[in-house]
Each structure stands twice: as C-alpha cells, then as structure tokens.
C-alpha cells in the first residue's frame, strides 16, 4: 500500500495512478473460485457458446473488471479513508491475456456531513484505449488539518 | 415474442418486494480467495494481525467481494452461484440473450472477515428500450446487507442485467 493520500493532496482533474493487469487463464480460474462465478465462458476455450458470439477466446468476467476499479479506489482511500460508493457499466468485452488498465480522475471535491468527499470518474480501458467499464466513485479521505 | 414484449402492471407490482433473508458469512478464507482472484497482494486482505494493527476488526474484504455467494447445494445456481430464494421476483421473460449491465455498491461500513451479514434482495427497477437487436429489458436488483448482530445496514448493491 502506498502512502496515505489526504483530501488536500488532490485537485479536480488529477488522475489516479493506474492499475494494469493482463489476466491469463489461471488468473480467471482463480477469480472464478474466489467469486463463485463458474461460467465456462471465462475459462473454457471449447465452451459451445463462444462461437455463436463470434469469439475465439475466453472473455474476462465483468465483475473482475469491477474489482480492478475497486483496487484503484481502495488504493486511493488507503487504510484511513473510506470508499462510500463505486459503480460501473459493462460496455464492452475484454479478452483473456490482454492488458486491462483501471484508471480514474477527480471530478469534484466537497465536504458533506463532516466528511471530505472526492468524486471520481473511473473506468477500465482495453489496449486500444476503449473504456469498456466506465463508472463513478466517491471516496472519503482524511484531512491534514 | 420478444418484439411484442411489454412490462405489465403485474411485473411492476413485484418492484420492492423483498426476498427471504440469506445469511452471509464473511470468512478469512473467502476474503483471501477473492483477493487472490483479483490479483491484489495488499496485506490488508490477507494478514489478520496486520489488518488489526491498522485499526480493522480483521482482514478487509476487497471492494467487489459482496455478491460472492455463500454456496449451499440445491439452494444456489450451480454455475453462477447466486442463491435461488423464495420471494424473489418471478418475471416471465421471452428474451433469450443476457448481458451483465453493471454493478454499483454503496458502503456504509467496511466489510471484514468475521462479519455475519443478512442479505435481502428485491427488484428495484424495470426498463424497456428499443435497440438494433430489438427490445432490451433492463432489470435492476438491489441487495441490502445488514449486520446480523446490530441490524445496521452496512452495504447496498445494485446489479443490472440486460435481456434481449
């Protein structure tokens, strides 16, 4: 875990340090076991439903990409901050072994109910730069004051 | 037929009706397995002593962990793992295609190993849209997680599925 980020450290428009991962089949099998989603679409290249979808490779679980956005916002919150909410839409498929980048940018800073809140646009992006999993998040951060 | 499908009053009447509650235990083993599955090596998800030294009750469930099913044979879907509960919505949908539309989680507390939660879910929204593939039905379900001991709501999660 990197050093704790404080509310005063961030400004609107600032980008978060990205998280990159190129999930191989073993990683997706680990995710299937950890998440309980054993849809063969994600780990069996002979799964009969792949061809009708025009696919030759397994696709990454949407929830795996959601979890990468989760890692990103959890890293921002650190151990002293709290993630209030985060959500994404699944707009495109990502394929096995292809790099996925979880990223985010600060869209607003506000104080509400005694908390220092940071609003973010978040996403996962594929190797071609397409945001396949766009969303938003809100994180409460500690203050230096 | 899917092209003639309309959302009926009977379907809308199921919005907000809670399913039966489902006990949801957050365990050290399941948290570590999920953390391994998403590729994080942050010790806050693996090392109980370290997590306690940082002020947490135990290891912290990674964001996204909620929804990982407690599996009981005969009571969960054998492939996807989600619980098949009485009281949930029964929608007769003619569409055969299914896409995962999105996931949104609101946290009112940190989820840690050792927490015992009670989850109920309900149909939160139904929307019908026209698309190049024909009619698409957006179904949003909301799960509410309460701490079993205190009754406090600790998280709400909304899942949207797209039927076409």
Image (cartoon, grey):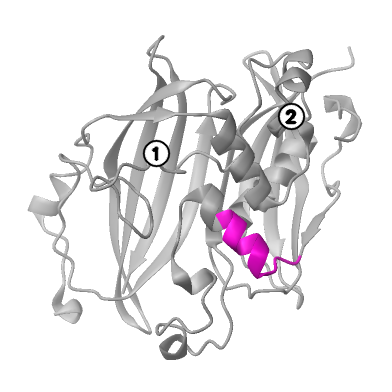
Question: Considering only vertical position in the picture, is B50 above or below A23?
Answer: above
A113 or B27, which lies in front? B27
Q: Main secondary structure of the magenta part?
A: helix
Mark 2 Cα within 10 Å, few/some/many (few <14, many 20+)?
A: many
Asked if the magenta segment contains residue A30, the reply would be yes
Horizontally, residue A118 falls left or right of residue A86, namely right
* Label 1 Cα crowd, 10 Å radius (few <14 / some 14-19 / many 20+): some
Whole-percent x, y for residue B36 in the image: 67, 47
The residue that appears at 41% across and 68% down in the rendered structure is B99
Q: Do the residues labelled 1 and 2 touch (CB within 8 Å)?
A: no
Identify the magenta region: A22-31
- Residue B133 position within the rendered picture, expressed as x and y whole percent measured from the top left: 35, 83
The chain containing the residue under callout 1 comes to B
Subunit that carries the residue with mark 2: B
Cα separation, mark 1 vs mark 2, equals: 22 Å
Magenta segment includes B102: no
Q: Is residue B33 above or below residue A26?
A: above
Mark drawn on residue B44: 2
Q: In which quarter of the image is residue A120?
A: top right
Q: Residue at x 58, y 55 (%)?
A: A31
Kindly identify which numbered label has been placed on residue B70.
1
**Helix, strand or loop for disc 1:** loop
Q: Where is residue B31 in the image (x, y as percent from the top left)?
A: 59, 36
Secondary element under disc 2, as helix, strand or loop, is helix
Q: Where is residue B70 in the image (x, y as percent from the top left)?
A: 39, 39
- Which of the marked residues, 1 or 2, is nearer the chain's N terminus? 2
Residue at image location 78% in from the left, 49% down from the top = A105
B14 displayed left or right of A100: left
Residue at (63, 15) in percent of width and height = B57
- Against B159, residue A54 (above or below) is below
Q: Is residue A25 left or right of residue A76?
A: left
Examine the rendering and report whether any part of residue A87 can be seen: yes
């Amino acid at each position: 875990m990197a050093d704790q980020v404080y509310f005063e450290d961030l400004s609107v428009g600032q980008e978060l340090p990205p998280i990159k991962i190129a999930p191989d089949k073993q990683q997706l099998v680990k995710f299937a076991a950890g998440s309980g989603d054993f849809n063969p679409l994600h780990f069996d290249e002979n799964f009969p439903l792949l061809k009708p979808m025009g696919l030759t490779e397994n696709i990454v679980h949407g929830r795996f990409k959601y979890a990468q956005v989760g890692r990103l916002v959890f890293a921002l919150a650190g151990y002293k901050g709290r993630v209030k909410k985060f959500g994404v839409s699944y707009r495109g498929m990502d394929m096995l072994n292809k790099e996925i980048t979880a990223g985010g940018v600060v869209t607003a800073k506000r104080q509400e109910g005694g908390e220092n809140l940071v609003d973010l646009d978040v996403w996962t992006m594929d190797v071609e730069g397409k945001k396949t999993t766009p969303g938003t998040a809100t994180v409460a951060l500690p203050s230096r004051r | 037929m899917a092209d003639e499908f309309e959302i009926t009053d009977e379907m809308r009447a199921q919005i907000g009706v809670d399913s039966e509650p489902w006990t949801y235990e957050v365990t050290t083993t399941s948290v570590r397995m999920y953390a391994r599955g998403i590729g994080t090596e942050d010790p806050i998800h693996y090392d109980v002593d370290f997590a306690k030294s940082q002020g947490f009750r135990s290891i912290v469930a990674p964001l996204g962990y909620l929804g990982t099913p407690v599996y009981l044979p005969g009571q969960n879907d054998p492939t996807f793992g989600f619980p098949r509960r009485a009281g949930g919505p029964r929608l007769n949908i003619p569409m055969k295609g299914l896409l995962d539309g999105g996931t949104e989680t609101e946290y009112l507390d940190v989820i840690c190993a050792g927490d015992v939660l009670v989850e109920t879910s309900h149909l939160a929204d139904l929307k019908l849209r026209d698309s190049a593939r024909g009619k698409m039905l957006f179904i949003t379900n909301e799960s509410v997680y309460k701490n079993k001991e205190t009754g406090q709501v600790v998280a709400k999660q909304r899942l949207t599925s797209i039927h076409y």
